Amino acid sequence: MPLALRFEHVSFSYGAGPPVLRDVDLEVERGEFIAIAGPNGGGKTTLVRLAVGLAEPTQGNVDVFTRRIAYLPQRAQAGIDAPLTVRELVTAGRASHARLLGPLASADREAVREAIERVGLRPQADRRLAALSGGQQQRAFIAKALAADPQLLVLDEPTTGVDVEAQDAIAGLLQHLRDELGMTVLYVSHEFGAVEQFVERLILVRGGIVFDGPPADLPGVWHDPSHLHA
Amino acid sequence: MLDLEFMRLAFGAGIVVGVLAPAVGFFLVQRRLSLVGDGIGHVAFAGVALGYLLDLPLVLTALAVSVVGGLSIEWIRARRRTAGDQALALVFYTGIAGGVVLVSAAGALNVNLFQFLFGSILTVTRGDLAVIAALGACALALIALLYRPLVAVVVDEEGARVAGLPVALLNSLTVALAAVTIALSMRIVGILLIAALMVLPVIAASRIAWSLRSTILLAMGIGLGSVLTGITVAYYANLPPGATTVLVSAATVLVAETWSTLRG
């Protein structure tokens, strides 16, 4: 299977501070669904920000071999005061895929409609985002990412701040998307228990990669909650 | 009132400015850059002063210097080595101080600078109106053509960057459009007050709108209504038109806020 992403001896520090990540080597094949777990402050978000090009490695190389990338940041929210509908949010996700000038083509409008349907928000499509529940808002942001028809989808703690029911719904949705669309997915979670049931590969990050393999092979010691604190 | 040519010219320029200022201001407000207009306004003053010094058309020198000043603010802000408010302060004060020095060097300290700082409907010429209409139409057409990518950037700048949109170019374009708007509006509202017309109608619209698209369209309507009402009231009450327009615009914010609170 061709590669989607490769890290070679990657280290990263913020300014003159201590390294957040040290000597990371990582290869991700196209179509893989990978959970990235680890303690808070362990470097998970930094790892994915390097992957999507929002940060530059202090040392080493990051190579991305896919063209269309979508990134859902932690606690995603629209950074604006004006009212924003679900459809407008999802259309914003299509901007990079559609032609730059002029109104949206009919194929792009159809892609936006499909993305909204995939996350089950068709009845709420023209409602204001702020009027929806936390779980529905998160699904709207996932639809925004899907509207770009991404080859690589990066989700940073997409279930943070939503209730358990919504967490299950989002997990089920991602499982379905993986099976149906076959895109490469990096799913960040600070708790691997939440994701290990639906991924084949788990990467545990704590200043570097301390485990990389099937969740079933994770040493028992890592299931100890004390290891969740860096 | 419309029998007088200077009023017809003022209304013509006011219509363009009233629609254009909130359309550009919408993107600044959503990016939390409401005060950028103020900063560029101060730089525009240096442009007016340069026009006096070089004996060139003041709208054109204000336009050129505003665009350079606006792009400088965006460049400093984007490098993130200087906080956004510090970048603004640097350009803000350099602009106004530079303007005073240049006006002094041109021996024009005795001219009525108030007409540029706070607007004067008596100063709009046919030539001004032609420039304002042509550049205003181009700016509005550009916003209409680039509406979707501009919205994508204000909704989620990092997401747009990851997706490969030319974010730096779109942000620079927004600031350049703000500079053009300020240079075009200095005759009507004045360079110290135009930023208000870029921001206040957007704030009012966002309180009563139901979507992004309705926010920008309502803001343009409120801006147009504010300018037309402001010029009319100013004419009959013998008040300064720029300040009257801004006060009308501020009143719409109060009305929209009250309506939004009562609606719940």
Image (cartoon, coloured by chain):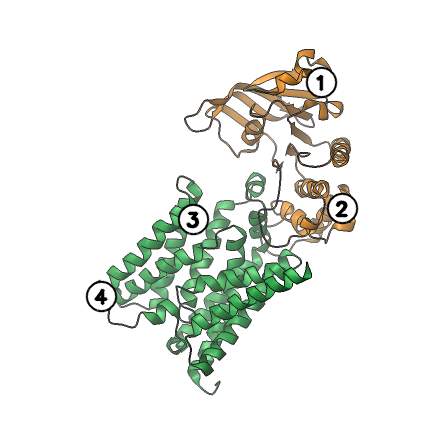
Chain colours: A orange, B green
Q: Are marks 3 and 4 on the same chain?
A: yes
Task: Evaluate whether label 2 is on the same chain as label 3.
Answer: no
Crowd class of label 2 (few under 14; some 14 to 19; many from 20; radius 10 Å): many
Tell whether label 3 touches label 2 (CB within 8 Å): no
Where disc 3 sits, the SS reads helix
Find numbered disc 2 in the image and state the secondary structure of the residue it sits on: loop
* Quarter residue B43 falls in: bottom left
Name the mark on residue A121.
2
Q: Is residue B188 left or right of residue A191?
A: left
Foreground: B263 or B113? B263
Q: CA distance from mark 4 to mark 2?
A: 64 Å
Q: Which corner quadrant holds the N terminus of chain A? A: top right
Residue with the mark numbered 4: B106
Q: Which mark is residue B160?
A: none
Q: To which residue does mark 1 refer? A: A215
Q: Left or right: where does residue A32 sit relative to residue B169?
A: right
Instruction: Determine contact: label 3, label 1, CB under 8 Å.
Output: no
Task: Determine whether A217 is above or below A31 in the image.
Answer: above
> Dot 1, how many residues are within 10 Å of its Cα: few (below 14), some (14-19), or many (20+)?
many
For the residues tagged 4 and 1, is the chain the same?
no
For mark 3, name the chain.
Answer: B
Q: Which residue is mark 3?
A: B74
Cα separation between marks 4 and 1:
76 Å
Tag 3 and tag 1 share a subunit: no
In which quadrant will I find the C terminus of chain A? Answer: top right
